[in-house]
Image (spheres, helix red, strand yellow):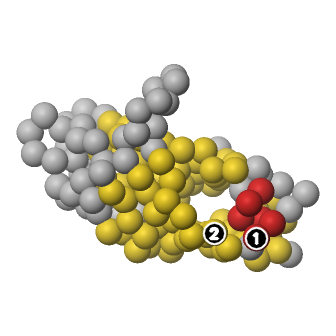
Amino acid sequence: MAKGVLKINVVEAKKLKNEDFIGKSDPYVKLILDKGNIQVTKIKDNDLNPKFNEKFTFNVNDQKKLKVQIWDKDTIGSDDLIGEDDIDLSEVISKNYVDAWFDLTKGIFGFRSRGEVHLIMEFIPK
C-alpha cells in the first residue's frame, strides 16, 4: 500500500451551522489520520465562514482515510461537533494532489449539510 507524506492546507470553511445559543460558533478543525495522529487548527472566534490557511504534515503508512472534524470551542462544558467527513485517501494518493471542498455532516445518517471545508492535499510517495 501507500507510504509517504501527506501535506494538508486547511484553507477555509463556509456555511457552518451555529452551535451556540448566544453569538456565533468559535470553530476549529481537527484532522485525524489515526488514533495517535491528530492535528488541530487555531480557533476562529465568532465566525461561521472562517479562513484558516494552516498547513499540516502527516506521515502516511497504509492509512486509507482522513477524518476531518470541525468543532465549536466552548468556554463552559465540552466542545460541540459542528460536522465531519471521512475522506478516502486513494484519490489523493493516485493523483498526488487534490484541491476540493468537502461537505460536513453530523449524526448517524449524516444527511444534512453542516457546512463545507476547503482542503488542499498533496501526497509525496516514499
- Mark 2–mark 1 distance (CA, rounded to whole Å): 7 Å
Towards the viewer: 116 or 45: 116
Residue 19 location (% of width, % of height):
24, 37
Residue at 69%, 50% (x, y): give it. 88
For the point 60% across and 44% down, the residue is 86
Kindly tell me whether residue 89 is visible in this rendering. yes
| Amino acid at pointer 1 | Lys
Task: Say which element carries label 1.
Answer: helix
Extreme residue in the top direction: 108
Side of 57 where 28 appears, left or right: left
Q: Residue at x 77, y 65 (%)?
A: 93
Q: Marks 1 and 2: in contact by CB < 8 Å?
A: yes
Pick the residue in front: 14 or 58.
Answer: 14
- From what the image shows, is residue 5 above or below residue 17? below
**Residue under circle 2?**
98
In the image shown, does 51 or 14 lie closer to the viewer?
A: 14
Label 1 environment density (alpha carbons within 10 Å; few <14, some 14–19, many ≥20): few
Q: Which residue is mark 1?
A: 95
Q: Is residue 17 left or right of residue 114?
A: left
Q: Is residue 121 left or right of residue 95?
A: left
